[in-house]
């Protein structure tokens, strides 16, 4: 009997929204957004991150100056307690997503073999 894969995906989405990792992430994200200085600093950090990623994806080289500025922003952001907690929560959520991706990709890996083989 065939399974509607989209129904399973929506069920997984609901499970993610109820997971401790997501609930913690959302709580901490809301705390950062409620703090004007933390929100401003976090938004600047995200903008810098996105700009560097877009530059990288378009094949442009990131300059030494841009790298140094990014490292300073990261160091500053990591010193802010709320943003540091948010980054930790993001990391935990990212690990969960990575584990889910491994599970989801398992049938294709079994069919074609691992890409890194």
Image (cartoon, rainbow, N blue to C red):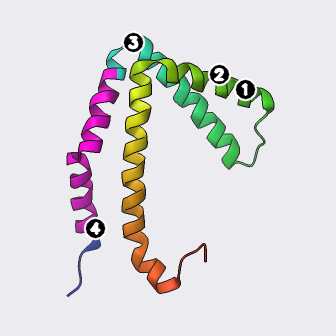
For label 3, the crowd category at 10 Å Cα-Cα, with few meaning under 14, some 14 to 19 and many 20 or more, is few
For label 2, the crowd category at 10 Å Cα-Cα, with few meaning under 14, some 14 to 19 and many 20 or more, is few
Residue annotated with mark 2: 72
Q: Main secondary structure of the magenta part?
A: helix
Tell me which numbered mark, 4 or 2, is placed earlier along the sequence: 4
Residue annotated with mark 3: 36
Tell me which numbered mark, 3 or 2, is placed earlier along the sequence: 3
Q: How many marks?
A: 4
Q: Position of residue 49 (x, y in %)?
A: 58, 34
Tell me which numbered mark, 1 or 4, is placed earlier along the sequence: 4
Contact check, label 3 and label 2, Cβ < 8 Å: no
Q: Position of residue 62 (x, y in %)?
A: 75, 37
Occupied quadrant, residue 116: bottom right
Can you tell which of label 4 and label 2 is closer to the viewer?
Answer: 2
**Which portion, as a residue range, is magenta?**
6-31
Q: Is residue 69 left or right of residue 11?
A: right
Tell me which numbered mark, 3 or 4, is placed earlier along the sequence: 4
Can you tell which of label 3 and label 4 is closer to the viewer?
Answer: 3
Tell me which numbered mark, 1 or 3, is placed earlier along the sequence: 3
* Distance between mark 4 and mark 2 Cα atoms: 43 Å
For label 1, the crowd category at 10 Å Cα-Cα, with few meaning under 14, some 14 to 19 and many 20 or more, is few
Q: Position of residue 22 (x, y in %)?
A: 29, 42
Residue annotated with mark 1: 68
Q: Is residue 72 left or right of residue 6?
A: right
Quadrant occupied by the N terminus: bottom left
Residue annotated with mark 4: 6
Can you tell which of label 1 and label 4 is closer to the viewer?
Answer: 1
Contact check, label 2 and label 1, Cβ < 8 Å: yes
* Distance between mark 1 and mark 4 Cα atoms: 44 Å
SS state under label 4: helix
């Amino acid at each position: 009997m065939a399974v509607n894969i989209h129904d399973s995906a929506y069920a997984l989405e609901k499970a993610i929204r109820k997971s401790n990792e997501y609930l913690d992430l959302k709580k901490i994200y809301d705390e950062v957004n409620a703090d004007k200085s933390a929100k401003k600093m976090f938004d600047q950090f995200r903008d810098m991150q996105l700009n560097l990623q877009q530059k990288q994806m378009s094949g442009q080289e990131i300059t030494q100056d841009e790298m140094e500025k990014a490292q300073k922003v990261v160091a500053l952001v990591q010193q802010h307690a709320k943003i540091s907690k948010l980054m930790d929560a993001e990391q935990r959520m990212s690990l969960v997503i990575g584990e889910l991706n491994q599970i989801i990709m398992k049938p294709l890996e079994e069919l074609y073999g691992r890409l890194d083989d």
